[in-house]
Amino acid sequence: MTLTLAQADAYIRDHAATVAPQFRPQAHFAAPIGWLNDPNGLVYFAGRFHLFYQYNPYSAVWDTMHWGHATSRNLIDWHDEPVALAPDQDYDRNGVFSGSAIVAGNTLVLMYTGNVQQADGTVRQNQNIATSTDGIHFTKYASNPVLTEADLPAGASVQNFRDPKLTMHDGHYYVVLASSDRAEAGQILLYTSDDLLHWRFVSILLRGIPELGTIAECPDLLTIDGQDALVFSAIGVVGGGANVNLALGQMDWQTGQFSPRTIHPLDHGRDFYAPQSFEHLGTRYLISWLHSADATDYLPSHDQQWNGQMGSPRVLHLGKNGTLRQTPVLPAGYETDVVATDKSMPLAIATAVTACDGLAAGQSLMLAGKHGAIQLEQTAQTLMITTHDAIPTQHLALSLAPSTSFQIILDRSSLEVFTATGQVASLIYFVDTPLTEVRTSAGQVPLAIWHETANN
């Protein structure tokens, strides 16, 4: 059965009001109904920020993917737009998979992966173009796909060829793509074009390192404060699980090779995946998918009709020593009250709390509610983060010295911790009622608590 845009929009219109608010975030983007995963097509166009995303409007579990769409003027308040892309062509009939966006003159151009399942059960993936002049209604290119398995380099897997991320350099368009070789080792491919429609293979941008796993999904070639960088989400890494890494290094555009100097996790939480970045007015922003690595099906198993949310938008920049700093985008019109307390204080369901001077060794903060809590405890060298009476149980450890400031972004089912040293951890948790108070251990802890101003 062909799934159309009209069907998706009608379903959302008729069923979105039935979604229960119990676990839904207040300060993080979630789709109006259904399953959400990877952010796609992050871009600023026609006076608004655009967020596209992998989307199944019909169920709270992953299925045949569409592209959902939302817009914002401040990266905080999002407005749901009509579904942008549906799997309505033969070349994308089993899913409109992840991709990206770029502005070309007065046109917004999307590039995405079409997923096709063959009669024998094998998968073939191809790359396609869709365009819009109003940023809302998109037309698929009549000669799609623009890249197929025939464009793969020798030795590349024909089943793993996805997640195009567009960029521009020296007047030419480029795209990086996730791939693996036939020995199931991850590699990242580079192609170039002068018109976004006709592409030629340049190189295998990066391969031969264990951090790429069996495939490094959602690759993103970018610059941060003039420094070349590559972000990728690797699966099949040694030790299992998935790792999102940031590689800082040197891009050689003549040879099409990226030489990493350092490779580090972008986020130390398990519930962070498939981030995508974009640049606007000289600032590099990044948004990720916050998913529960250990309780992916918790929401549908509890009769919820939605699943998945985006992380807080982050600004990426480099510190004086060249290490990455990540700063959350917080709403304008908010202010902080700095308090020093060893007592309990009420919190809004969604809020930001800064431990201004960090915690002394042995001190802790407890974010608590009626049915659960999250504890942040400082040891001599580590900030320990533990969920109590929550699904899933989590234990995270950030290397952090005592008295180092950190900031918490708390929402109904997520927690993000941003430290002054640049380390970040994101986690998803489910408790029946929100966490609405903060308690500190013995000894006063100065806290800056964000709240909405009266005139906002």
Image (tube, rainbow, N blue to C red):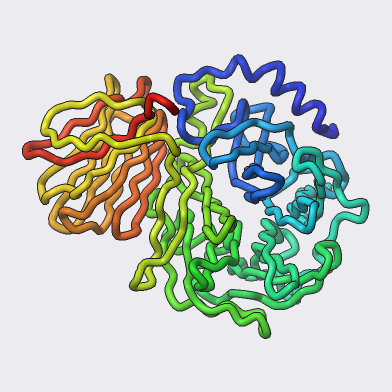
Q: Extreme right residue here?
A: 142
Q: Residue at x 59, y 62 (%)?
A: 220
Q: Give me the residue at 10% from left, 38% from top.
A: 444
Work out which quarter of the rendered image holds the N terminus and state it: top right
Image height of 306 relative to 320, above or below: above
Residue at 30% across, 24% down:
436
**Residue 77 locus on image (x, y percent):** 54, 34
- Residue at the front extreme, as displayed: 455
Q: Is residue 136 left or right of residue 43?
A: right
Residue 115 drawn above or below residue 157: above
Residue 219: image location, x then y, percent: 60, 62
Looking at the image, residue 51 sits to the left or right of residue 271; the answer is right
Q: Residue furthest left?
A: 443
Rendering quarter of residue 263: bottom left
Quadrant location of the C terminus in the rendered image:
top left
Image quarter of residue 181: bottom right
Q: Position of residue 320 (x, y in %)?
A: 35, 71
- Measuring 85% from the left and 47% from the top, which residue is drawn there? 140
In this rendering, the count of numbered labels is: 0
Query: Would you say residue 328 is visible in this rendering?
Result: yes
In this rendered view, identify the residue nearer to me: 245 or 2.
Answer: 245
418 relative to 18 in the view: left or right = left
Task: Find residue 255 and report its horizontal and vertical position in percent.
Answer: 67, 84
**Residue 198 quadrant:** bottom right
Is residue 147 shown to the viewer in this render?
no
